[in-house]
Amino acid sequence: MQNSYHPERGSALIYILIAIALLAALTVAFMEPSSQQGQNQNTFRTVSEIASQVEFIRSAAQECVLTYPAGDDSISVTADEPNANEAYPINPNSTHYATATIGPSGNRNVSGIRCPGNPGNNDENHIQIFSAASGKFLPPPPPLFSPWQWYNNTDGVFFWIATDKTDAFLRTALEKLDEQYAECEADFVDATAGDVSLVSDDATITCPNGSVCFRVRLIARGTATYLGDSNGDETAAGC
C-alpha cells in the first residue's frame, strides 16, 4: 500500500498555526497599550498647549513693560494697589479701575489684564492687553482647565492655571511642564487633599481643594510662597 502522508501538508499547517499565533499576539500588543498611547498623546498635547500659552501670556506682559517701563505710578500712590509692581499689569479686578471707562472685572482672569502706562502715566484707562485694540487675543484655556488667573501684589507677579478633573494625564502633564522651567520659576501645586495658598497676603488666592495647578512667576519678592516641585529639589530656602 502506498503511504499517502505528505510532509508538505504538515508543514503548511504549522505555518498557519504560527501565523494565527502571531496575529493574536499582535492584536493583544496593539489593544492593551491603546489606553496608554491615548494617555501619552493627551499628556503631550496638554504640555504643548499650556507651554504655548505660558509663553504667549509672558511675552505679552513683558512687551507692555518694555514699551511703557514707567508704568502708572498712581497705582501705588493711592490705596488701590500699594504693593503692586507699577510696570506690570495689576489685578484686573483692582479698584484702581473704579474710575476707568472700563471698570474692574469681576475676576482675576488673565484675559482682562491691562497695560499700565498705556495710555500715559497717571491714567487709569489702561489698554487691555488682549483685545481688538491691541490685536492680541488670548486663546481659550486648554481642555479641562479653568481660565488663567493673574496676581500682582506683595509676593510679586505671577499667573496660574488650575484643573479639578481627575484624568491621570493632567497631573503627569503639569509635572512634566514643571521640569521644563528653571527652579523657582514655576510651581506644580497639588491641592487634591485641600486648598493650598499661593501667596502670603491673601487667603482667597489658592489652588482650590481637589485641584492641581501650574504657576509661572514673572517677578518674585522676599515674601513669596514656594511650594516645591515634582522632583522635590525646589525649596523656599533655595529660591
Image (cartoon, helix red, strand yellow):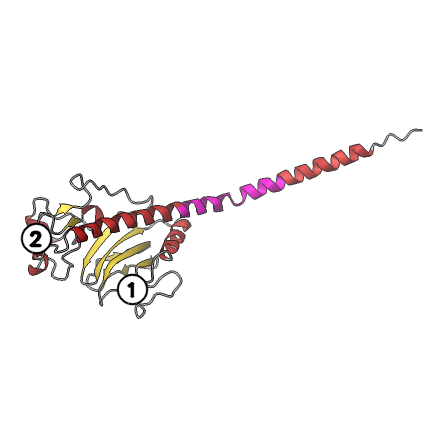
Whether the magenta-drawn stretch holds residue 43 is answered as yes
- Please give left or right for residue 132 compared with residue 123 in the image: right
In-front residue for pair 123/166 = 123
Query: Please, what is the three-letter code of the amino acid marked with disc 1?
Result: Tyr
Q: Which residues are magenta?
A: 24-44
What residue is shown with label 1? 226
Whether the magenta-drawn stretch holds residue 224 is answered as no
Query: Please, what is the three-letter code of the amino acid marked with disc 2?
Result: Asn
Q: Which mark is residue 102?
A: none
- Please give left or right for residue 7 compared with residue 126 in the image: right
In-front residue for pair 190/62 = 62
Instruction: Tell me residue 170's x, y (percent).
Output: 38, 50
Q: Residue at x 12, y 58 (%)?
A: 81
Determine contact: label 1, label 2, CB under 8 Å.
Answer: no
Q: Residue at x 5, y 49 (%)?
A: 99
Q: Quadrant of residue 218?
A: bottom left
User: Which quadrant of the rendered structure holds the C terminus?
Assistant: bottom left
Q: Quadrant of residue 18?
A: top right
What is the count of numbered marks? 2
Instruction: Tell me residue 163's x, y (percent).
Output: 32, 50
Instruction: Tell me residue 231's x, y (percent).
Output: 40, 62
Residue that extends furthest to the right in the rendered view of this protein: 1
Depicted 114 relative to depicted 156: above or below: above
What residue is shown with label 2? 121
Q: Residue at x 20, y 40 (%)?
A: 135
Badge 1 element? loop
Label 1 or label 2, whichever lies nearer to me, is 2
Instruction: Please tell me whether the stretch drawn in magenta is mainly helix, strand or loop.
Output: helix
In-front residue for pair 43/119 = 119
Badge 2 element? loop
Q: Quadrant of residue 21?
A: top right
